Image (cartoon, rainbow, N blue to C red):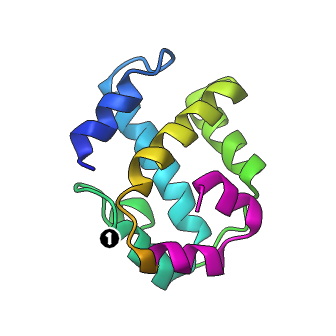
Amino acid sequence: MEFRDLMKAVNELAFVKDEVMAEAAVKAVLGVLASRLEEEVAKEFVESLPEPFDFETLRGEQVEVTDLSVQQYRNTIADQFNLELDDAWQLVRTVLYMVRDGFSDEVIEDLQDTLPSDWQRLLQI
C-alpha cells in the first residue's frame, strides 16, 4: 500500500473537507494507535507504514503508553476533527483497513500479543 492510495481512500470520505484534513486525520489515526503500543511494537508497526510516516512523526518523544480503549480512540478522533462518532469510526476503519495489508506476520503477532481483544477486532487481526 502506498501513501497516495491511503490518501485517496480518506479523501473520498464525504466528511473529509480537503487534503490537509485528510493527511492530518490519517496521521492522528495512526499516531493514536502507535501511542497505544509499547515502544518496540510501535516501531515495528510504524516501519510497516508507507512514507512519510515514521516513529518520530507518529509518536515523537512520548514515553508512556496510553491505555485508551477502542471507544476512547474513536472519541479522540471525533473530538480532534469535530466529527460525528459514526464518521470517526468510518475514518478509523478506512485507515486501518488500508494499512493492515502492509503488516508482516511478525507485526501482526506482536499486535496480537500486545493489544486487548477489542483492539485486535478493530484491526481485524
Q: Is residue 101 left or right of residue 91?
A: left
Q: Does 123 lie within the magenta span?
A: yes
- Up the image or down, 101 lies above or below 91; here it is below
Q: Dot 1: what SS?
A: helix
Q: Is residue 118 left or right of residue 103?
A: right
Image x and y of residue 42, in percent = 47, 74
- Up the image or down, 55 lies above or below 98; here it is below
- The residue to which callout 1 is attached is 47
Is most of the magenta stretch helix, strand or loop? Answer: helix
Image x and y of residue 25, in percent = 46, 38
Badge 1 amino acid: Glu
Residue displayed at 31% across by 65% down = 54
Q: Does 7 lie within the magenta span?
A: no
Image x and y of residue 81, in percent = 56, 30
Image x and y of residue 23, in percent = 35, 37
Residue displayed at 49% across by 79% down = 41
- Please give the range of residues in magenta: 107-125
Circle 1 crowding by C-alpha within 10 Å: few under 14, some 14–19, many from 20:
some
